[in-house]
Amino acid sequence: MSPNDAAPRKTAADMPDAQRAEFGRRLLDLRRDRGWTLSDLAERSGLAVSTISKAERGLISLTYDRMRQLAKGLGIDMAELLSAEGAAFQPGSFAVAPKGTFKRQETRNYVYEMLFPELRNKAMMPMLGTLKAHDLMDFDDFVRHPGQEFLMVLDGAVTVYAEGKAPVVLRQGDSAYFDSSRGHLYASAGAEDVRILVVCTDFEASELSGDAPVNGASESTPD
Amino acid sequence: MSPNDAAPRKTAADMPDAQRAEFGRRLLDLRRDRGWTLSDLAERSGLAVSTISKAERGLISLTYDRMRQLAKGLGIDMAELLSAEGAAFQPGSFAVAPKGTFKRQETRNYVYEMLFPELRNKAMMPMLGTLKAHDLMDFDDFVRHPGQEFLMVLDGAVTVYAEGKAPVVLRQGDSAYFDSSRGHLYASAGAEDVRILVVCTDFEASELSGDAPVNGASESTPD
DNA sequence: AAACGAATTTTCGTATTGGAAAAAATGTCT
DNA sequence: AGACATTTTTTCCAATACGAAAATTCGTTT
């Protein structure tokens, strides 16, 4: 392999801007919530003024050591510094989705009916799905995503394939719970369509960020 | 100020070794728990083998971007990557609960069927419940717990009371999603029993350990 | 013990972070 | 509006992160 063929180094510039920018905004908020200037935080944390400024604007990606210094200077722990990056789930939120109220979401193997798409930053992502009988699933690519997944069969029978395990058939009322970073795939197990409920955690917002219109409106009234 | 008086740049070498080393050990444990080589994790995360190796041994301080990549590759979120060694959901977990497989859990107002009680440290707590028709609910005490809650009506009609809101009636197939620290209560809305599925986040293990007295327990005990 | 493949560590060059100082922008007061 | 102080951003250079490849170590088989 000649030098020209070397894979380009993945640079910070290749990262999605949104995540770095969100962290920066959070850092800025934490500082301003305290009424501090960049100098104040610099003194308390031991970081340079310019470094903090650049981090707040998402221009640089801080190292672990620097983040520890910042957390200490802000009087918080690392989890808090990194938690709820961006907007948090709206306190007091209450939303209702009547049957048939969802946002359609297509993936390679499934069509999902996302519930409560208007609720930002949910810890859980509930969705309904129908698996057609005799659909050919693409077994070359198990689905994987960080977090955990709960499956309940509402109607029919589904075969659940989990990487490294024998397939298992679940029927109406049965459920499964698993680490969703493990490869997994669902398929109808019988002659009829299957109706399932899936609830996932830890979805990246960008994976579900489509702004398509909601099929019907659901009440969402924070008080 | 002469150049000799300039404050020396705080280098990574000046950081306490213990914290960086601790992070490195955690990263190593996370990888080994999965039975992965450095190459495996490198592939999944997009980081170089040598970078991961150096991070595990505390030789370098990873940037935020790189840590995000690692978390994604490991199938965990940032909080878990940075959390102190504590209880974690078992990587690769996969559990099936056939209909009727649950642990009974009684609270003041409800009797729940907890699903997957054997899975420790779940991000979600799925449970089924039956609300008896004509049950008298104790309206003096809304239920509250930190986190978020998803409700789906499997059969029948339920009235959902949320503090500060008008009651809303949900029927089979309807669902609700809300901040569970907001006071809430469910009651049968009709002449027949109601079957519901509830999935909660952020439960303290102690809240569901069954240690609480069945009747007479005060829901207003601060934690 | 030797051979071999796999896994990890080391090396070295490039890219990026990080800090100090200068420049620019912003805020306050008259 | 102008003067001045404060805050933030930009600039430039040194230090360190990072990746690819080479070297070393480790594990398995004969």
Image (spheres, coloured by chain):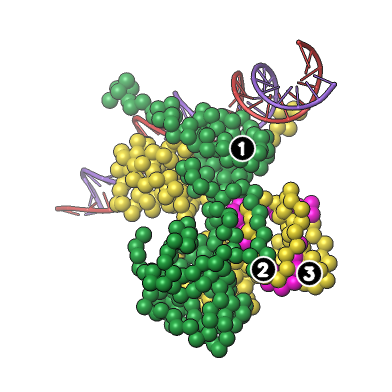
Chain colours: A yellow, B green, C red, D purple
Chain bearing tag 2 is B
Residue extending furthest bottom?
B191
Q: Secondary structure at mark 1?
A: helix
Residue placed at 40% from the left, 27% from the top?
Answer: B14
The residues colored magenta run A139-159
Residue placed at 45% from the left, 58% from the top?
Answer: B206
Which residue type does callout 3 highlight? Answer: Lys
Chain bearing tag 3 is A
- Residue B35 position, x and y percent, is 66, 39
Disc 1 and disc 2 in contact, CB within 8 angstroms: no
Number of residues whose C-alpha sits closer than 10 Å to that of mark 2, classed few (under 14), some (14–19) or many (20 or more): some
Mark nearer the N terminus (1 vs 2)? 1
Number of residues whose C-alpha sits closer than 10 Å to that of mark 3, classed few (under 14), some (14–19) or many (20 or more): some
Which residue in the structure is indicated by mark 1? B32
Q: Is the residue at mark 3 from the same chain as the one at mark 1?
A: no
Q: Quadrant of residue B16?
A: top left
Q: Nearer the viewer, residue A121 or D24?
A: D24
Which residue type does callout 1 highlight? Answer: Arg
Q: Secondary structure at mark 3?
A: loop
Q: Which mark is residue A132?
A: 3
When the figure is inspected, residue A19 is found, relative to residue A168, above or below; the finding is above
In the visual, does A195 lie left or right of A16?
Answer: right
Q: Secondary structure at mark 2?
A: loop
Report the mark closest to the observer, 1 or 2.
2
- Residue B179 position, x and y percent, is 46, 67
Chain bearing tag 1 is B
Per the model, the C-alpha gap separating discs 1 and 2 is 35 Å
Which residue in the structure is indicated by mark 2? B99
Per the model, the C-alpha gap separating discs 3 and 1 is 39 Å
In the visual, does C13 lie left or right of D5?
Answer: right
- Residue B163 position, x and y percent, is 40, 76
